Amino acid sequence: MADRDEAVTLDAGDPLRALYDRFVVADDGLIYLDGNSLGRLPRDTPARLTEVVSRQWGERLIRGWGEGWMRLPTTIGDRLGAGLLGAAAGQVAIADSTTVCLYKLAAAALAARPGRTEIVTDADNFPTDRYVLESLARERGCEIVWIECDPQSGPAPEQVCAVLGERTALVALSHVSYRSACILEQREITRLAHRAGALTLWDESHAVGAIPLTLDDDGVDLAAGCTYKYLNGGPGAPAFMYVRAEHQATLRQPIWGWLGRAQPFEMAPGWVPGEGIAAMLSGTPPVLALAAAAAGIDVVLEAGIDAIRRKSIELTQYAIDLIDEWLAPLGCSVGSPRDAAIRGSHVALVHPDARTLCPRLAGEGVLADFRTPDLIRLGLSPLTTRFVDVHDGLERLRELLRRE
Ligand SMILES: Cc1ncc(COP(=O)(O)O)c(C=O)c1O
């Protein structure tokens, strides 16, 4: 299994192999295990940006707004929703950073549950999610109910259920843990939250483009997520917001900008919500960033999420097998679920010196992420990570640990 030829054979038989060539690989010697932080550049992206910059902006100038720019947040949102989120049309918009989207959605949820004063989340949720919820709690006089749980597994439905009650306004969690890659039971947790009368907000940043999502069928109320990770949308690419159709008439986000207003060009006094998901928008769409995000999303749609998921399971299992075989005797252990059914597309490797090991590994030409306190996070992005990358990356880590 630890034979490199076997990794080469696995790559040769990979049904997604052809799509690897649709991405820029500028340095053949670099092993990139960070596609879950910043996805690789699709080869199509520069040409698509050039079209928007040179022809649309350069030639069409302000006419571009009437020729499609204004609708980009929702047209690309619908494409993402149908292909990757399990969301029917009219429920997804792409705008703002993930942080701002989370803020808008959480604020809207709290406003929709007056008299309820508790926000449930887990202590190991991604920092920006925790900070956004803390700021809202302070502003609205609410309290955060922190679920403390094993960081390798994340909150189970029973743990969430134990803290739900008539004071719960919102349950806000990450679907896939940014540390361990554990997949939470979104449907069951959502059901329990609804039974308590609360709304749910899911951060899908480490899930979208990595695992199949079924937001409509799971009953999810609200969701947000990055487009620059597995969707390869580019650094700082705008995030998506999902608002379930049945909530759109009543939920109100707090940033009342002109482009979320009905008939914005009337420039009329007072804010009245735009139609449907458009009411979640605030300001001018970032057209160039949206063009890059669309290029990334389109490659993922072409691959299809089922094929991506199949490869993700094989890649992460391959990494876990190598860690067990090569690295466990050198002081490493696996910090991600061993059960593929609850494992996303990265593998956390635990080592007491992870903080210093990670930059030294980068010195050996292997890019991964350090996450406090002792994790090296190996992002295995199915379209752009090959089995030989996993093999060679972990071999270089083994050699580094042996030398030391
Ligand atoms: C789970 C999760 N949420 C949010 C973010 C980032 O939010 P933003 O795009 O606003 O920086 C990240 C970034 O890694 C993340 O992993």
Image (tube, rainbow, N blue to C red):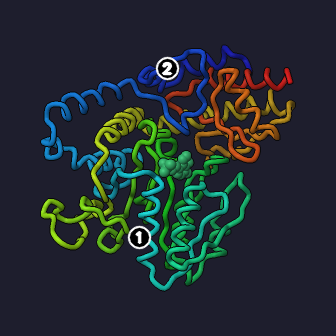
Counting residues from the start of the chain, the first of labels 1 and 2 encountered is 2
Residue sitting at x 37%, y 54%: 87
Count of marks, rendered view: 2
Beta carbon at label 1 within 8 Å of ligand 1: no
Note whether residue 213 is visible. no
The reply to whether discs 1 and 2 touch (Cβ–Cβ < 8 Å) is no
Residue 113 placement: quadrant = bottom left
Q: Nearer the viewer, residue 288 or 122?
A: 288
Horizontal side, residue 315 vs residue 271: left or right = right
- x then y, percent, for residue 272: 23, 71
| Image location (x, y in percent) of residue 44 | 34, 26
Q: Is residue 143 left or right of residue 372?
A: left
* Residue occupying the point 61% across, 72% down: 144
The residue depicted at 25 percent of the width and 69 percent of the height is: 273
Question: Which label number is shown at residue 108?
Answer: 1
Q: Height in image: 119 above or below 234? A: below
Residue 304 visible, this orientation: yes
Closer to us: 71 or 3: 71
Three-letter amino acid code at the position of disc 1:
Ala
Quadrant assignment for the N terminus: top right
Vertical comparison of 302 with 278: above or below: above
Residue, disc 2: 25
Amino acid type indicated by mark 2: Val
Residue 190: % across, % down: 52, 67
Image quarter hosting the C terminus:
top right
What is the crowding at mark 2: few (fewer than 14 residues within 10 Å), some, or many (at least 20)? some
Q: Quadrant of residue 370?
A: top right
Mark 1 and mark 2: Cα distance apart in space: 42 Å
- Residue 247 left/right relative to 344: left
In what element is the residue under mark 2?
loop
Q: Position of residue 346 (x, y in %)?
A: 62, 39
